[in-house]
Amino acid sequence: MADKSADYERFCPGEEHIKITEAICIGRRRANYRKCPGCRFNDDEQGRTPYYAPSGPAGVRPPPRSVLEMEKVDVIEQVFKAYDVRATVPEPLNEDLAWRIGNATAQFLRTTLTGYDRSDSKMNTLIVGRDMRKSSKRLCQAFMEGAASVGSPVIDIGLIDTPQIYFATNYMPCCGGVQTTASHNPANYNGFKICGAKGKPIGIETGLKEIQRLARAVSRHVVPQLSPIRTMDLSEPYRNFLHRYLRTPRPLRVVVDASNGMAGRWLPIILAGVPNLNIIPLNFEHNGEFVHPPNPLVPANLAQLQAAVREHQADFGACFDGDADRCVFVDGDAQIVRNDLITALLAGEYLRERPGCTVVYDLRSSRIVPETVTSAGGLPRRERVGHVFMKRAMAENNAVFGGELSGHFYFRDFYYCDSGILAFIAVVNTLTRSGKSLAELVEPLNIYASSGERNFENDDKEGTFQRIAAKYKDAQIDYLDGVTVQYEDWWFNVRASNTEPLLRLNMEASNDRLLAEKLAELTPLLGKPVEH
C-alpha cells in the first residue's frame, strides 16, 4: 500500500498535534474557518493555488501549481475589475466561472450579516437579475446555482435594468443583489454588478477582492441539495415607486434611444399612460443585438438620436446605456448636453426644495457645478470617480443628489444609488416646472471651455503624475484621484482608468484660447493619444 503520510502535513495554528490533509484545509478556508486568516498554509493569502484532488495513481501527487491551476488564477484576475466582474464570453467568462463567482458572492455577502440576521433565511437571500444579452440567461442561471450551493436562497427577478437591483435590495430583506450585465460594453461581453443589502456598493475595496479570493479557491461541483431558487416580478412596486417622483408633465415630445438595452423594456412599463408625455422610441428592441454600441458617451452613438430630434422637432432627446443606469441628453436643437451641466442643472433644482443639502460631484466636473451648488445654498462635495465612491459619499453626507461626468446620476430618494430612468424623470420635471427648453436652462451654465475626456496610452502612470506635479508646482495640487492641478483661470485632472490601460485627461479653462494653449503644453507629457 502506498504511503499516504505525506498527505497529512498541515495543521491549524495552535493544533500542531492534529495533522490534516490539504483537502480538509481547503474545505476550512471555503467555510471561512476562524483560524485561516494569517495561517502559513493559507494558499490564497500566499498567492498559491491549491490542487483539489490527486488525478494520477494512488499516492501520486500532481505538482502543486499545474498549468491548469495557473490558468485558473489568470482567468479570475482577468474578469474582476475595480467595480464589478466583466469580460468577454465564452472566454474567459463562461458558465463554470459564473458558478464559482456565484458561490463566492453568496459566501461573502452572508458574512456581512450580523446578529439575528445570520440565522434568518430571508436575510440570507440573494436577489439576482439579468439584462438582455444573449449570454445573460445561462450565465445568470449558473451564478444562481453557485449561490444556492452554499445555502443561500435565491430570488430571480428576471429581465431588469440595473437600478431595479438597488430597488429590490431595499424593498425586500436580503443579504445583497447581483445584476448580470456588461453595461455599455459590446455584445460579446458580460459580467456581474454586485451590491450588498440596501444597495450598498461592492467594489474592490469593499468586498470584491474577497469574492475574487473565494472564487479562486473553489471549483464547480455537484451539491446534493440546492437552496431554493424562485422567481418574482417586481414591476408593479418598482413602477409605483418611480411614479412618486414624476410630476404631471407639460406637453413634451421626447425622442428616447434605448440602445437596444433594458430601457427598451422598462420605459414603456414605467411611463405608459403618462399624460402629455409623447415618447418617440428608438432601438427599443432588446434581443441582444445592437444597432449601435450601447455606450451613450461616444458622440457617434448619439447621431441617430440627434437626427430623430431634428426630424420630429422634439423638445429633447435621451440615450440610455445597455443596463439603463446611465442617461445622456441632447437638447431641442439636437446639441449634446454635457453630463456635468446636467449635474449643475439638477443640483439647482433639488436645492430649490431642499436648501442647505449636500450635492456630490466627481472631480472631473466643471467648476460650474460647485459654483451652482453654492449659489443655490447647498454644500458641494467633490469626490473620486466611480459609483462605489460616489454612493459612499452620498450616504455619509446624506446628499440630496450627485452626478458623474459618465452620466451616472445619484438620488437620496433612490437609496443614494444611480438611475437612468430617475434622471430622465428629473429632467422632465425640471422642464415642466420652469416652462423653459433644455437649451435655455443649460445656456447660463455653459460658461467655461472644456476639453472633454481625452485618453492616452501610457506605461509609466506614476512617473507621469510626478512629472506633472513638478512642472506645475506653483499650482494647487491634490491626489484625490490621479493628480488634479488648479489655477485661477484653468485646471485639469489626469487619472488612470479603472477599466482600461489608459490615462484620462479632463481640462477646463476660462476661454477657448487658453484651453488650446494649455492642451498643447500638457498633452506631450501624457503619452500616445487614443481616439475613441
Image: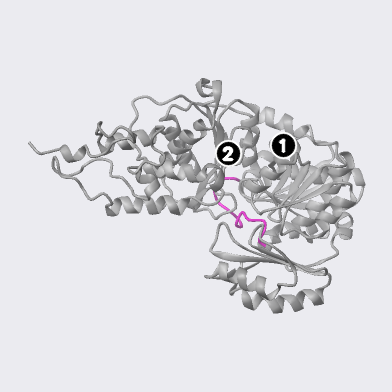
Q: Quadrant of residue 34?
A: top left
Q: Residue at x 89, y 47 (%)?
A: 377
Indicate the secondary structure of the residue bearing disc 2.
strand
* Amino acid on which the number 2 mark rests in the picture: Cys
Q: Earlier in the sequence, mark 1 or mark 2?
A: 2
Sort mark 1 into few (<14), some (14-19) or many (20+) by Cα contacts within 10 Å.
Answer: some
Residue 93 vs residue 439: left or right?
A: left
Main SS of the magenta segment?
loop
The residue that label 2 is drawn on is 195
Instruction: Tell whether position 75 is magenta.
Output: no
Sort mark 2 into few (<14), some (14-19) or many (20+) by Cα contacts within 10 Å.
Answer: many
Q: Quadrant of residue 505?
A: bottom right
* Amino acid on which the number 1 mark rests in the picture: Phe
The N terminus, quarter of image? top left
Disc 1 from disc 2: Cα separation: 14 Å
Q: Residue at x 42, y 49 (%)?
A: 76
Q: Which residues are magenta?
A: 286-298
Residue at the right extreme of this rendering: 435
Across and down, in percent, residue 273 comes to: 78, 34
Residue 247 vs residue 420: left or right?
A: right
